Structure formats: C-alpha cells, structure tokens
Amino acid sequence: MTLLKKNNPERRWRSFKRHTVLLSKTLCFATAITFTWYFLWSHGYHFAEDDKDIQIGATTMIFGVLYGAIISWVLLTRSDKYEKVLVSIFRKDLDTFLMYRDERMLIALHLAMGLVSLPLIGMIGAVPYRHMATGAISVFSVSLVIVTFWSVIALLEDPLKNQWIRERVDPTWLTMDVDGHFKFGGK
C-alpha cells in the first residue's frame, strides 16, 4: 500500500473535496435556518420592541457564554482524544488505540450542546430587528458558527473517518473486539 504524503496531489484533492463538502453542508444548513427565520420574522414572529434590551442581554450573557464554555470544553476533549489516537498509531500502541477508537461523547453532552444552541439561535432570531439584513446576517452568522462547531466535533468524534489514519493503521486494529482484547465480560 502506498501512503499518501503531504505534497501528494491526490491527497490534496481529497482534502479539498472533504473540506468543500464540510463547508457546503454548514453553509446550506445556516442558509436554511436563515430562510426559516426570515419566514417567521416577516410574519411577525419575534419579541416585542420593548423587550429587546432584556432579551439581547439574556441571550448574550446566558446562552452565548454558556454555549461558548460548553463548546470550548467539548472541542478540547475531542481534539485530545483525536491526538491520542494519532500518537497510538505512530507508536504502534494497540492498547491506547483500542481505548480511544470507539470512545464517544456522552449523550448528555450532545443534549447540553443542543439545548443551549437551539434557544441561542431562537432568541437571536426573535430580536425585533429594524432591518431585515441585520437580522439575516445575525442569524446566519450564529447558525454558521454553531453548525461548523457541531461538524468539527463530529469529525473529531470518529477519527477513523479520516483516510490518512485509515491508511496508517493495521487493518486488524479496526475490527478488533475491545472487550475481548481487554478481557471484559469474561469469567
């Protein structure tokens, strides 16, 4: 098997395609959220003008800061796991690889991210903007950032989706039973 190296045109093309798909997905999703916002906004679904200052303060301080804290911690832990998988491949350390290969984020963390990101987008969309462009830019920007973070976390969550890693890992490591290797569930 020939490993694709840093300056390999095939690797660069594959990387370009993969990143284009990632960006296209996030742009499409953010655009869909913005169109949904526009439909609701143009039909009068937003907070009253009197509540604007309180609502913006609550959105920014509670949901924005909380989301930033959660996402920072999740990105840090997921990138740490990804790095451990990479190092285990370079060191040919099967035990470490198997410890982290199938490790996934707790469902509670997925829920925490979702339960903060949805109200954040909703409350930013519910601001009674004076100009449609201001609202559209705000909703699109926040949606794009949130969707991009979720997409990056999904990629970090499963390092085996990365072709570079799959090229370098022993194929038997990919199908090996973790419980059997560590002798869990035995007598």
Image: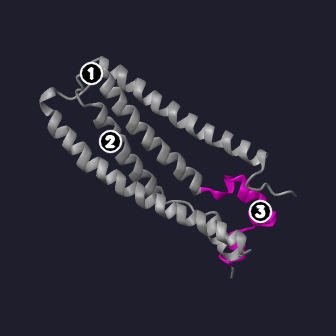
Q: Quadrant of the N terminus?
A: bottom right
Q: Indicate the quadrant where residue 176 lies.
A: bottom right
Q: Quadrant of the C terminus?
A: bottom right
Q: Which residue is mark 1?
A: 131
Q: Residues within 10 Å of mark 1 (few under 14, many from 20)?
A: few
Q: Which residue is mark 2?
A: 120
Q: Indicate the quadrant where residue 2 lies.
A: bottom right
Residue 33 lies within the magenta run: no
**CA–CA distance between discs 3 and 1?**
53 Å
For this rendering, which residue is in front, 88 or 100? 88
- Extent of the magenta region: 158-185
Image check: 96 left or right of 129?
right
For this rendering, which residue is in front, 121 or 133? 133
Q: Which numbered disc covers residue 157? A: none
Residue 104 lies, in percent from the top left, at: 56, 60
Q: Residues within 10 Å of mark 3 (few under 14, many from 20)?
A: some
Give amino acid for label 3. Answer: Arg
Q: Which residue does the image show at 31% across and 31% down from the upper left?
A: 125
Q: Residue furthest bottom?
A: 187
Residue 142 lies, in percent from the top left, at: 38, 39
Q: Residues within 10 Å of mark 2 (few under 14, many from 20)?
A: many
Q: Secondary structure at mark 1?
A: loop
Q: Which residue is mark 3?
A: 168
